[in-house]
Image (cartoon, rainbow, N blue to C red):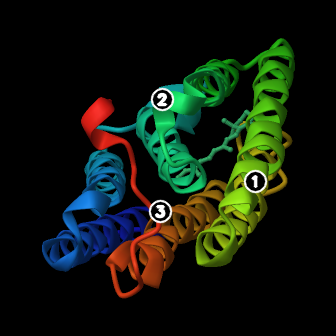
């Protein structure tokens, strides 16, 4: 088994373990905070599925002699909106009160991944037009997250504001790495060999999904060890 397949199997195992840990944490969680556990567990499940597909050779195709892991984008198109939903649920007491903002956030995010998928599957220079479109949508996502939702979270004050601050900073740092690795990797300028790209994406995916999930779900705000201040509007969704 080569280093790429080994990495993909390790990725699968970590995502499955993360899923089991999140489900175990959900059992003890206050009912009002269950949405965070369901959304984050679904992120781990989808990632485990995608890594399994890639490890077994069913998540990639050859395009002009280069391996293209299309399964990543199927993963990201579902998991990045779910991660953003976690952050939005944290920032606003009721998602419905910010329905327009959250819809724009998730719409821009889905556009970012779909245009990224097209960019990744093209072998001529028009791919950079798709890359640029994707990047513009990424800037919109970051703006809504770091300016609009951050403002909402700060207004909620205390530990919710602090948790949102930490998680959105982690999100900013990790998510910015994705287009950079993509550009340096085999989809872009080929500075990184495929093995390095697969390893770096696996590390990013584990921290952005499982690391993020642990920080969120074990926080006193969400796990219920603190007087409940977060009430996602699950009943009105
Ligand atoms: C692509 C290439 C085109 C330009 C941009 C990209 C951004 C991808 C991002 C992915 C985030 C993934 C996460 C996954 C799992 O947790 C599609 C690489 C802007 C931001 C966080």
Residue 124, compared with residue 145, is above or below; it is above
Q: Do callouts 3 and 2 mark residues in contact (Cβ within 8 Å)?
A: no
Across and down, in percent, residue 93 comes to 51, 48
Which mark is in front, 2 or 1? 2
Q: Residues within 10 Å of mark 2 (few under 14, many from 20)?
A: some
* Quadrant holding the N terminus: bottom left
For label 1, the residue is 150
- The Cα–Cα distance between marks 3 and 1, rounded to whole angstroms, is 20 Å
Q: Is mark 3 within 8 Å of ligand 1?
A: yes
Q: Closer to the N terminus: mark 3 or mark 2?
A: 2
Answer whether residue 205 is visible to the viewer in this image. Answer: yes
- The Cα–Cα distance between marks 3 and 2, rounded to whole angstroms, is 25 Å
For label 3, the residue is 209
Across and down, in percent, residue 193 comes to 70, 57
Q: Residues within 10 Å of mark 1 (few under 14, many from 20)?
A: many
Q: Closer to the N terminus: mark 2 or mark 1?
A: 2
């Amino acid at each position: 088994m080569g280093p790429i397949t080994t990495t993909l199997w390790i990725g699968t195992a970590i995502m499955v373990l993360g899923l089991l840990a999140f489900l175990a944490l959900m059992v003890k969680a206050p009912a009002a905070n269950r949405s965070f556990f369901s959304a984050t567990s679904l992120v781990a499940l989808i990632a485990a599925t995608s890594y399994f597909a890639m490890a077994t050779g069913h998540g990639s195709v050859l395009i002009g002699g280069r391996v293209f892991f299309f399964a990543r984008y199927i993963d990201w198109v579902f998991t990045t909106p779910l991660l953003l939903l976690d952050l939005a649920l944290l920032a606003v007491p009721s998602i419905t009160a910010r329905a327009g903002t959250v819809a724009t956030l998730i719409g821009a995010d889905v556009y970012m991944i779909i245009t990224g998928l097209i960019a990744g599957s093209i072998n001529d220079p028009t791919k950079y037009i798709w890359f640029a479109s994707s990047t513009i949508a990424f800037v919109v996502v970051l703006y809504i997250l770091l300016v609009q939702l951050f403002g909402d979270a700060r207004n909620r004050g205390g530990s919710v504001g602090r948790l949102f601050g930490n998680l959105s900073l982690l999100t900013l740092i990790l998510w910015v790495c994705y287009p950079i690795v993509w550009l340096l990797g085999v989809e872009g300028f080929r500075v990184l060999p495929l093995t390095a790209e697969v390893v770096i994406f696996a590390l990013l995916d584990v921290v952005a999904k499982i690391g993020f999930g642990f920080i969120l779900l074990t926080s006193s705000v969400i796990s219920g060890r603190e007087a409940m201040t977060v009430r996602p509007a699950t009943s009105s969704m």
